[in-house]
């Protein structure tokens, strides 16, 4: 993509309010206290001031370094560090202290691990559920290189919402997403739902402004629906640095509103569409159907997927646990 295509001047509707609530600083202090990473900061999300000001955050597990180098993403690409054995417990404690009713858990791509970090997702989901019964758990996952057994680890922990972003249209995928494949992402979404007999809400997101065409966006919507996705997010791509892909277009809010209506008419159950919308933005505005939530909780109880609060190591990362984990993995 020609970097001269970049549109430097942001339009008036791309505005971010700086923090002015004590909840923002409380959230920041809590995250620092528990030595946690958030995608809010790592991905330079434009909504972090608002979300933290409301006492919410999206937790990013499995480290700060990603093994992929996507052309749109601000998260650092570098050799990852070892997984922290007590990170699931620290995320669980954060959700308890923040009194969250809905938590979003995401991660960097960990292609250095055989399971792509799937077991770490599983442990985090179980720890959060144990310490916070009744909380809605949403995961935003990488593709695990389409390893079914790894994906099954995540689904066995029974998240309520399974999110994997398509990110862009098929034509632009090789340029925008490092190592990822358009149809592989669609397959992951469909298989995740099938693994739990449809008892999960599936969700995906697309960025606009990278030079995609209208008909390609509509085709992507159809492809997602054909793969059983029920929740869609549409947002404006914003260039993190000059080394990243250029912004070809700033999409007008009216166009986002039009796409939202089209998506709803096509059959999506819930659509969030706007210039500053991101995958986790106002995630709690959508709640899975009660019958799905009831089924999930019954399955959780039937399989004994729980940890006792006294089993959770809280709060800080303990070097001896990390060392023990490394020995067991080797």
Image (spheres, grey):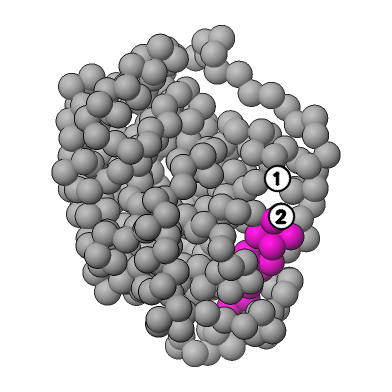
Instruction: Confirm or deny contact between disc 2 and disc 1 (CB under 8 A).
Output: yes
Q: Residue 93 appears at what percent x and percent y?
A: 69, 66
Packing grade of label 2 (10 A; few <14, some 14-19, many >=20) is some
Q: Is residue 124 above or below residue 5?
A: below
Q: Is residue 25 left or right of residue 286?
A: right
Packing grade of label 1 (10 A; few <14, some 14-19, many >=20) is some
Q: Is residue 319 above or below residue 204?
A: below
Depth order, front residue of 270/181: 270
Label of residue 98 in the image: 2
Labels in figure, total: 2
Residue displayed at 52% across by 79% down: 306
Q: Read off the residue under disc 1.
A: 55
Q: CA distance from mark 2 to mark 1?
A: 7 Å
Residue 26 makes an appearance in the image? yes
Q: Residue 268 appears at what percent x and percent y?
A: 29, 36
Depth order, front residue of 63/206: 206
Span colored in magenta: 83-99
């Amino acid at each position: 993509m020609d970097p001269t295509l970049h549109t430097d001047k942001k339009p008036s509707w791309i505005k971010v309010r700086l923090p002015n609530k004590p909840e923002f600083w409380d959230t920041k202090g809590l995250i620092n206290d528990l030595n946690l990473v958030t995608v809010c900061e790592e991905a330079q999300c434009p909504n972090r001031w608002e979300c933290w000001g409301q006492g919410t955050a999206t937790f990013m597990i499995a480290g700060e370094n990603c093994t992929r180098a996507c052309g749109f993403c601000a998260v650092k690409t570098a050799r990852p560090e070892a997984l922290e054995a007590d990170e699931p417990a620290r995320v669980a404690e954060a959700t308890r202290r923040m009194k969250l009713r809905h938590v979003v858990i995401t991660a960097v791509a960990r292609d250095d691990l055989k399971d792509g970090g799937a077991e770490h997702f599983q442990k985090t989901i179980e720890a959060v559920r144990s310490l916070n019964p009744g909380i809605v758990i949403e995961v935003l996952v990488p593709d695990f290189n389409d390893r079914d057994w790894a994906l099954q680890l995540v689904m066995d922990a029974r998240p309520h919402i399974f999110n994997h972003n398509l990110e862009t249209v098929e034509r632009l995928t090789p340029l925008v997403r490092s190592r990822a494949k358009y149809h592989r992402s669609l397959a992951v979404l469909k298989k995740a739902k099938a693994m739990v007999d449809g008892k999960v809400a599936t969700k995906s997101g697309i960025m606009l402004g990278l030079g995609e065409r209208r008909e390609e966006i509509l085709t992507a919507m159809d492809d997602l629906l054909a793969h059983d996705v029920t929740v869609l997010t549409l947002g404006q791509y914003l260039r993190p640095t000059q080394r990243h892909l250029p912004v070809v277009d700033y999409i007008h809010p009216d166009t986002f509103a039009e796409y939202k209506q089209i998506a709803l008419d096509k059959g999506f159950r819930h659509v969030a569409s706007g210039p500053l919308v991101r995958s986790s933005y106002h995630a709690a505005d959508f709640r899975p159907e009660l019958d799905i939530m009831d089924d999930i909780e019954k399955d959780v109880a039937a399989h004994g997927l729980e940890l006792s609060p006294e089993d959770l190591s809280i709060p800080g990362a303990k070097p001896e646990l990390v060392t023990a984990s490394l020995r067991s993995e080797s």
